[in-house]
Image: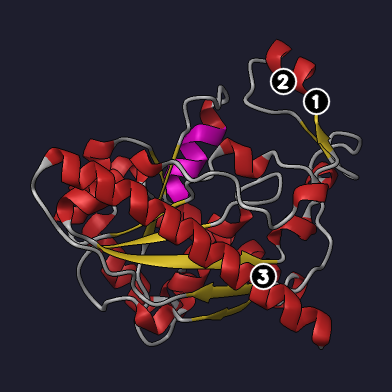
Amino acid sequence: MSHFVATYRDFVRQSVKSDRYWGFDVRALARLEPFLSFLYFEWWKVNFDGLDRLPEKGPAVIVGNQGSVLPWQALMLIYGLMSFNQNPRRVHIMCDLDWIDDERLNAFLIEIGFVPWSSASMKRLFERGEIVAIFPEGVAGLSKPYSQRYRLQDFDWTRLLPAVEEGVKIFPLSSLGCDEAVPLLFNFEPLATFLKMPYFPVSPFFPWYPFPLNLASRPIAWKMHLMKEVKYEKGKDRDHLENTAKSLTQQLEGEIQAELNRALRYRFKV
C-alpha cells in the first residue's frame, strides 16, 4: 500500500474526497494495481490517447464501446485515468450489477469503482464533480460473438439521459483490441437461462479451463482513443431532453463506430 500511495499520490489525494461513495476502497484498487499494470503495459500494451481532453475538475461522462467476455475496457479506463500523470482522476463505472449473485464479486467490483446503475446515482456523482463512464451497449456488447467484433450493438439512450438533463460534458471513447482479446465463440443461451445469467460465454478458454485460466486472454495490442467533447443543445422541456438524448446517442454510436473503422483500416495498412 505504501508503494501504491507513493506512486499514485495525486490520485489517492483526489480519491479521498469520494472514497465513501458506494463502498469504494482505494486499498482494493491498490491490491489490484500490479495486475492492471501488467495487462496495461505488458500484455495488451495499451496505447491510450486523448485523456488530456477531460476537464481537470468538474463532472464529465465517458461513453465507450463494450466488448470481450468481461468488462476489461472499464478496468483499463480506471487504470489509464489513475496513471495519467497530467491530471489523474477517479472514474465511476456505471453498470448493471443486479444479475451478479455472488456477493463477494459484487462487493469487489464496487470497491474498485463500479457503481450500480441508477439515474439518481449518476446525478449525485455529477453534483459532486465526478467523472462517470457508461457502456450503452450493455450485456449485448459483452455477449456478441467474434464474428460481430467491432460492430456496435444499439446504444441505450436512457443511459445518457441523466447527463443530458444535467448538461454534463460528454466524451466518446473507442477501444480497439478488446473484442479480440477474449474472443467469444457463442452465447450458450439455454445454460444462461438455467443459471439465471444474462449470458453464458463460450470462448477458447471459458468455461473449458479452471479458474483463473478460463479468463485467459490473447496478447492483442489495444488502442484506446478519447475523442473530442460532443456538443449538444441544453433544454428544460422533457420532450426536448429525451429527443436530445436519443439523437445524441445515435451520434455517439456513429462516431465511435467510425473511429473503430478508421483504426482497423490503419492497423491493416501497417
Percent across and percent down for residue 128 are 16, 56
> In this orientation, does residue 85 appear?
yes
Look at the image and give the residue range highlighted in magenta.
105-112
The residue to which callout 2 is attached is: 192
- Nearer the observer, disc 3 or disc 2? 3
Assign a secondary structure to mark 1: loop
Does 201 sit above or below residue 232? above
User: Could you tell me if the residues under marks 1 and 2 are in contact, i.e. CB atoms within 8 Å?
Assistant: yes
Q: Residue at x 65, y 76 (%)?
A: 262
Does 112 sit above or below residue 140? below
Assign a secondary structure to mark 3: helix
Mark 1 is on which residue type? Phe
Q: Residue at x 53, y 64 (%)?
A: 256
| Badge 2 density bin: few <14, some 14–19, many ≥20, Cα 10 Å | some
Q: Quadrant of residue 81?
A: bottom left
The residue to which callout 3 is attached is: 261
Mark 2 is on which residue type? Ala
Does 267 sit above or below residue 90? below
Percent across and percent down for residue 68 are 70, 50
Mark 3 is on which residue type? Asn
Which mark is on residue 188?
1
